[in-house]
Amino acid sequence: MFPLFFDPTWILLLPALIFAMYAQAKVQSTFARYLRVPARAGYTGAQVARQILDRANLHDVRVEMTHRHLGDHYDPRQRVVRLSPEVYNGRSVASVGVAAHETGHALQHARAYVPLSIRNSLFPVAAFGSSAAFPLFFIGLLFGSMGSWDLGYSMMTIGIWFFIAALAFQIITLPVEFDASARAMRLLTTGGYLAADEAPKTKAVLTAAALTYVAATAMAVAQLLRLLVLRGMFSQRD
């Protein structure tokens, strides 16, 4: 058995970590590239979001500016689409794409899109699970290394189940994000916000953003595998 301070299972995370770094670099570079390409229709991200919401009769959903770079999101509790300054005020193919994507989440919410409903219901459990999983697991690991195997094994198992809840949240996030991007592209092209030759550029931005969610899920799967391997190693005690 390896010493407690030496953990060779970290190598299991390397492929997912490299993928996550690539995805983050990809979204940053793609967004920066197309942020410099103006959409010929001339709408700002805020105008696009507001018009799409009004056309869907979602007049009560607000559009606000947040000051976090790439902090664009839809808040279902307060029914607010929040856009970063470069998206809120921007008139680029990237700005209108991100604005339409976040507005797509508001449409999902209004129309009770099933994966989004499941995701929202999982959020409290996943939030608790993501914060509790590792402390429980590694406290159990410590107990196991000190000879209290039954207690340690139980705590590690509970930690793993908490982490599975967090992973389930990551997995259900994927169809939610893909659907929001698909809605965004339809709304932008049919609504006259993008010309036919501009659509692939906006789609590249949304595809790069979606890649970060895929990478986060891959990282969570790799981490779960690592926890299972660690527990299995400690189960082979003398």
Image (tube, rainbow, N blue to C red):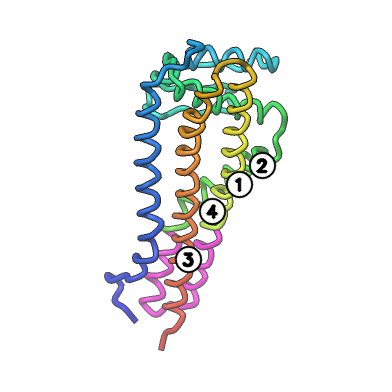
Under circle 1, the secondary element is helix
Q: CA distance from mark 4 to mark 3?
A: 12 Å
* Label 4: how many Cα within 10 Å (few below 14, some 14–19, many 20+): many
Predominant SS of the magenta segment = helix
Q: Is residue 88 left or right of residue 104?
A: left
Q: Dots 4 and 3: beta carbons under 8 Å?
A: no
Please state the horizontal and vertical placement of residue 192, each as a whole percent of the image: 60, 15
The residue singled out by tag 3 in the image is 225
The residue singled out by tag 2 in the image is 115
The residue singled out by tag 1 in the image is 172
Dot label at residue 53:
none
Q: Is residue 154 magenta?
A: yes
Q: Is residue 212 left or right of residue 124?
A: left
Under circle 2, the secondary element is helix
Dot label at residue 167:
4
Q: Amino acid at mark 4?
A: Leu
Disc 3 or 2, which lies upstream in sequence?
Answer: 2
Taking the spot 51% from the left edge, 45% from the top edge, the residue there is 127
Q: In front: 142, or 212?
A: 212
Considering the image in quadrants, where does the N terminus appear? bottom left
